């Protein structure tokens, strides 16, 4: 099973700041990695797939990069609605599909 | 507009059973892989099971294999999850999720709002 480790667990930032979230895989997942956003009481929302492709309707301030074992989700300038929990997910080797433990982006 | 509406959750005693349903609309249901993903209270996401289109192949997490059964009724655009021999650690919100076009082992581009399963005596 591929383990995804996200860091930091919590990121405290102010609106307008840049957010950089990390996801590290226990073995290579090539570029088969997605990022999701989840707000309290809501279902997850797909943001990024195949490491760097934005899903439909996702603002350009969200970008993904990386390949192999190290991946990054960057939010270039935080908007109030971006404060949420973010999860990564791999599809390179399955079952099982696996998710990271999440990074909470909170208002400083 | 794609919509996924889950139902069937509730409070059940350890060892009990439930049948979760997910009614889909807004897309050609039979053409897409579908999955169940769960989230224990205050915890992260855990993939549970997936089903290929139109319904031939099933896949399960080790934690539920032999206890849960995924199926689909394409005529009713409905995804099902029969959950048996429930344990306290199965307590979670169960989300129905639509595959994003990569088959059963892919990403999920639409999610339902979830149905809560609570296993407690």
Image: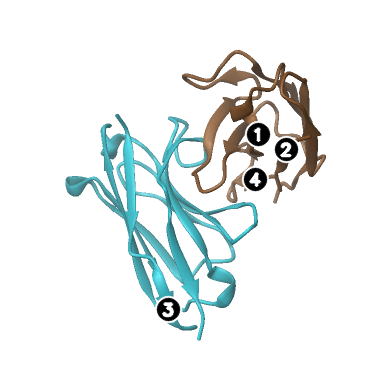
* Subunit under mark 2: A
- Badge 2 vs badge 1, beta-carbon distance below 8 Å: yes
Task: Say which colour chain A has.
Answer: brown
* Subunit under mark 1: A
Which of A72/B75 is in front? A72
Q: Going from the N terminus, do you reach mark 1 or mark 4 first?
A: 1
Numbered circle sitting on residue B12: 3
Quadrant housing the N terminus of chain B:
top left
Secondary structure under tag 4 reads strand
**Label 3 to label 4, Cα distance in Å?**
27 Å
Q: Do labels 3 and 2 share a chain?
A: no
For label 1, the residue is A83
Secondary structure under tag 2 reads strand
Which of B10/B90 is in front? B10
Of badges 3 and 4, nearer the viewer stands: 3
- Badge 1 vs badge 4, beta-carbon distance below 8 Å: no
**Label 1 to label 4, Cα distance in Å?**
19 Å
At x 50%, y 86%, the residue is: B121
| Residue density around tag 3, few if under 14, some if 14–19, many if 20 or more, within 10 Å | some
For label 4, the residue is A99
* Chain shaded cyan: B
Which of A74/A25 is in front? A74
**Label 4 to label 2, Cα distance in Å?**
20 Å
């Amino acid at each position: 099973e591929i383990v995804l480790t996200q860091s930091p667990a919590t990121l405290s930032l102010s609106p307008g700041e840049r957010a950089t979230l990390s996801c590290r895989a226990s073995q290579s997942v090539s570029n088969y990695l997605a990022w999701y956003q989840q707000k309290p009481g809501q279902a997850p929302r797909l943001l990024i797939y195949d490491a760097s492709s934005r899903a439909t309707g996702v603002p350009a301030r969200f970008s993904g990069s990386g390949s192999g074992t190290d991946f990054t989700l960057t939010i270039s300038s935080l908007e109030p609605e971006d404060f949420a929990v973010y999860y990564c997910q791999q599809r390179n080797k399955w079952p099982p599909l696996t998710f990271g433990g999440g990074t909470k982006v909170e208002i400083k | 507009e794609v919509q996924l509406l889950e139902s069937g959750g509730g409070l059940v005693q350890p060892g009990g059973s439930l049948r979760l349903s997910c009614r889909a609309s807004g897309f050609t249901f039979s053409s897409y892989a579908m999955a169940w993903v769960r989230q224990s209270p205050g915890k992260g996401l855990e993939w549970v099971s997936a089903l290929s289109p139109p319904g031939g192949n099933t896949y399960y997490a080790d934690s539920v294999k032999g206890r849960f059964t995924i199926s689909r009724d394409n005529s009713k655009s409905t995804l099902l999850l029969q959950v048996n021999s429930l344990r306290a650690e199965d307590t979670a919100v169960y989300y129905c999720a639509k595959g994003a076009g990569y088959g059963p082992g892919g990403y999920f581009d639409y999610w339902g709002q979830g149905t809560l399963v609570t296993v407690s005596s």
